[in-house]
Image (cartoon, rainbow, N blue to C red):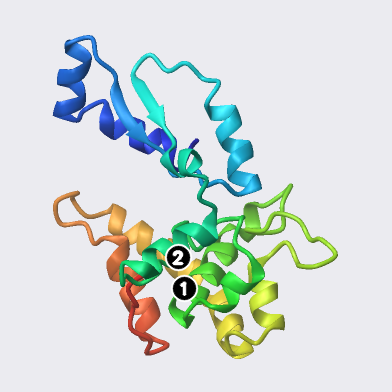
Amino acid sequence: MKYKAAPQDAFLRTWTPALAAWARGQKVVRLIGYDASPRDTQRYKHAATIDDPLYDNQYPLQSWGWDRDACTASIRAEGLPVPVKSSCVFCLAMKEEEVRALPPYWLRMIVLIEAQAAPRLRTVEGLWRRSTKSRPGRMTDFIRAERLLDPAEIDEIERTAPTALVRFQDVAASHPIETRPTLDTWLARFHARFEEPAPCL
């Protein structure tokens, strides 16, 4: 709700076609991509019970009985590339194999996020929250154990990046907003140290 539904709802509340439909007393038709797999069917069954005054939510994949494999087959049949995972690479729902498939650029970002957050964490270990029998609570520990990044690189990020980022933010805050350097400028320098261009996801 927080990271997907709420931002979409905020946008739609300012979208002219939606505002016009509501002014006419109509609902906006919204297509939601819950597939017919057991997990998404569970989500669908809950969502379908909600009577939304603004939206007529429809679930075409549920209506067609398409699970993930059927969606993939349809995409391939059209000669299109099958998209990769659509969620954020920092999502706590990331599977181990999904982390293994990430390029170094995004693995470094995970290490940076966990290193930056570490001093303030009290109830969780990291992005995966708590350790289980199959994986650690910190994605960084998994990245290290799997040797997805050089351990010396992980050590350097953990040792230097959080302090460097705070210094950057302090200096940036002293600039007027119109000339303030953005976080992108710091991240570009951060990644340049490891000579890895940012890939498109």
Give coordinates of residue 90: x percent, y percent: 53, 60
Nearest to the observer: residue 51 or residue 156: 51
Answer above or below: position of 144 versus 67: below
At 37% from the left and 57% from the top, the residue drawn is 170
At 40% from the left and 31% from the top, the residue drawn is 58
Q: Which residue, as the protein is rendered here, is positioned at the far top? A: 25
Q: Which residue is mark 2?
A: 73
Look at label 2 and name its amino acid. Answer: Ala
Nearest to the observer: residue 164 or residue 191: 191
Answer above or below: position of 195 versus 74: below
Secondary structure under badge 1? helix
The label nearer to you, 2 versus 1, is 2
Answer above or below: position of 118 versus 149: above
> 10 Å neighbourhood of mark 2: few (<14), some, or many (≥20)?
few
Residue 170 falls left or right of residue 66: left
At 59% from the left and 61% from the top, the residue drawn is 94
Q: Which residue is mark 1?
A: 106
Q: CA distance from mark 2 to mark 1?
A: 28 Å
Nearest to the observer: residue 51 or residue 150: 51
Secondary structure under badge 2? helix
Mark 2 / mark 1, whichever is N-terminal: 2
> 10 Å neighbourhood of mark 1: few (<14), some, or many (≥20)?
some
Give coordinates of residue 68: x percent, y percent: 53, 57
